[in-house]
Amino acid sequence: MRKIFISFLIGVFILTSKLISAKEGMWLPILLQKLNADEMQAMGMRISAEEIYSLEKSSLKDAIVHFGGGCTAELVSSQGLLLTNHHCGYRSIQKHSTLEHDYLTDGFWAPKMSDELPNPGLTAKIMTSMIDVSDFVLDSVLEGMPENQRQKLIANHIARLKKQYDNDQFHQVQVKAFYYGNQYILMTYDVFYDVRLVGAPPSNIGKFGGDTDNWMWPRHTGDFSVFRIYANDDNQPVDYNKNNRPYEPRQHLKISLRGVEEGDFTMVFGYPGRTQEYLPSYALEEITEKVNPFRIELRRQKLDIMAEAMNKSPQIRIQYSAKYAGVANGWKKWIGENKGIKRMNAVQIKKEQEKSFLEWRGISDSQDNNIINDFENAYAEFTNWDMAYYYFVETSYYHDLSRYVGSYSKLVELSKEEKLDTAMINKEIKRLSGTIDGFFKDYDKDVDKALFLASVRSYAQFSYDAPMPEVYSGYIHKKFKGDMEKYTDFVYSKSFFNDAILLKDFLADFSPSKVSKIEKDPMYAYVNSVKVNFQDSILPPFLTYQHKIDSLQHLYMDLIMQKRKGELIYPDANSTLRIAYGKVESYEPRDGVKYNYFTTLSGIMAKENPNIYDYVVEPRLKELYDSKDYERYADKDGKMHVCFIASNHTTGGNSGSPVLNADGHLIGLNFDRNWEGTMSDLMYDPDQCRNITLDVRYCLFIIDKFANARRLIDEMDLVE
């Protein structure tokens, strides 16, 4: 198997119209020269693969940043200046916002470097190398080996491998599986912890259209924010210190003011999070018919509760804006995903592919060694536990207080050990004490109480092949006769975790002898009961069936690659550095409708509605529009272009990714996908899937003309 896979990777690839679309895929930069460079250049790219990725000299990869663990950003100056999406910086902006300094509403622009705001916990990772280590990791790993034994052997090999590299807080080593464990790649990163907020437009620019327009095209969102990486005097990553200096990158991106036209070559460089393109039909059925529907409904309930409270109180709006956006993002995406899978008839397409696969294998439907039948049986057993798993995930993260209270479990464990470790206990007390103010800053008891009530009602109604948590089957049933509202009133009136002052006093005077106060707290008792039930009754069978499916998927992927030898097959996204490439393209979402490939500032004015929060337009922006004061940022048609679409294959994690032109110059910031293309994590449709990009000229226009932050423009290398 290993030799077959290597020959697949390094063989000669001749593309025909029958093979995978050039627009589909998220490709590994270390393989561009072998797999993609010729095609990319045939599509219009004017730079070499070595200019994109090289270990010998600086390349575009040195300007790409894994931002905050879930987004991408790009370096755009020699002084560590970063561009990313507004929604990627949203939580940082929100944490700096108060009623007196509401940066979410008003925006923020640091007049000088010393005014740039630190963001504890925010990281910026820059990849320094990417090496195929499959031979080492898979040494002695045999086909047919039990999955748990296989994973244990692989984990041991990875641990040995990591010891050969510097692996600390500031220099991280990561080994990840590709092609469902048929390939392993080691990546090294420099990790920066001093990342400061430099600027952000008001939300009615950076979030224009809000959740109404999320996942939609046409789009008019100025979705960007500006940060800066700081380093020590040796230009190395360190913790925050006010005396740190701006980081000097090996390379930063040049920015093009030339705009785009239909058919232009584009590529996206970033950290896509997760795709599942090679799942069997039974997995697609489970996702779209079982898991997605209940997750959509649970999140709808949560959104309704938060929206009602946010609409009544400016304070709650600030506290819950980032939380609301995070919940809404998945909710709307799954709705679109289900619609797209149904429209594309994706399950049937998968079944046809499986039929072709069996014919290639020379296996009949009824034979015992039919891996497709094995998948069917495995998912029949797995679905119930998969739903139970996600029900726990969705309801456990429904409300803030239970999640926060759960963070005290380590202190409880340390305090109950036979041999007390005083140093560890004091360290944990200090850590928890430092979280109190941050938690209560963004917490509202009444909102959280309403969310908790909705959560416990939903969880009580869910049935699966395992006992319910004792707090449901025993305590609530016996003491409250199953009345969830009375139980919720009791929890929120009696829990001392609801009071910041009581909590601070308790920790200030804490000793292990007082740990029972935590254990007897009604919210902690609830959290502990649900967690224990999950760990004892749900997680073991979930993992058993998941390992069985993983083993099948590993073999299935290997066989798919054998069947499709000679074709380009990209690995699923897994939060590692990738390149997607395509072209600027309009599309037709349905009969009689065609969407243009770009939008303009006039579209913002057409959408304006002062009575709808998502469509309020800044007065200053209207002034600039009325005067047509666009300067060099206008397109050659004289209009201020805002966004454009292209056929690059993207997913979550690509938010903030640079969209580059044929010369490798920055032309935009990727920030979304279209509604018709949200199913691209499971199956890509080149006719419908489009990535939505903020035109970098609109970004610069807002920085320069709207915010008067010319000092930032002066740092950048603009190509006119």
Image: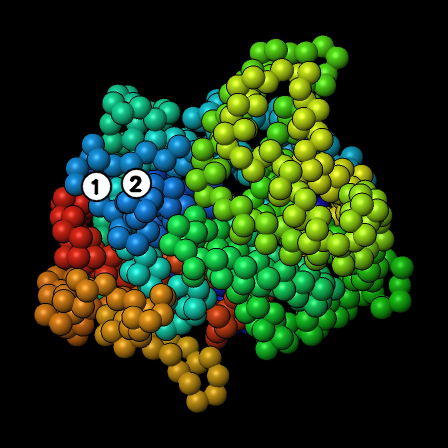
Sequence-wise first label, 2 or 1 = 1
Percent x, y of residue 590: 48, 83
Which residue: 75% across, 70% down?
355
Tag 2: residue type? Leu
Which residue: 29% across, 48% down?
103
Q: Residues within 10 Å of mark 1 (few under 14, many from 20)?
A: some
State the residue position of label 2: 197
Which residue: 44% across, 89% down?
592
Percent x, y of residue 612: 36, 70
Q: Quadrant of residue 437?
A: top left
Between marks 2 and 1, how big is the CA–CA gap?
8 Å
Left or right: residue 599 versus residue 40 is left
Vertical side of 128 occupied by 296: above or below: below
Q: Quadrant of residue 82?
A: top left
| Front residue (pair 16, 281) | 281
Left or right: residue 458 versus residue 256 is right
Is residue 613 visible in this depiction of the protein? Answer: yes
Instruction: Kindly check if marks 2 and 1 are in contact, taking CB atoms under 8 A apart as contact.
Output: yes
Q: Quadrant of residue 19?
A: bottom right
Q: How is the image coloured?
A: rainbow
| Front residue (pair 340, 175) | 340
State the residue position of label 1: 110
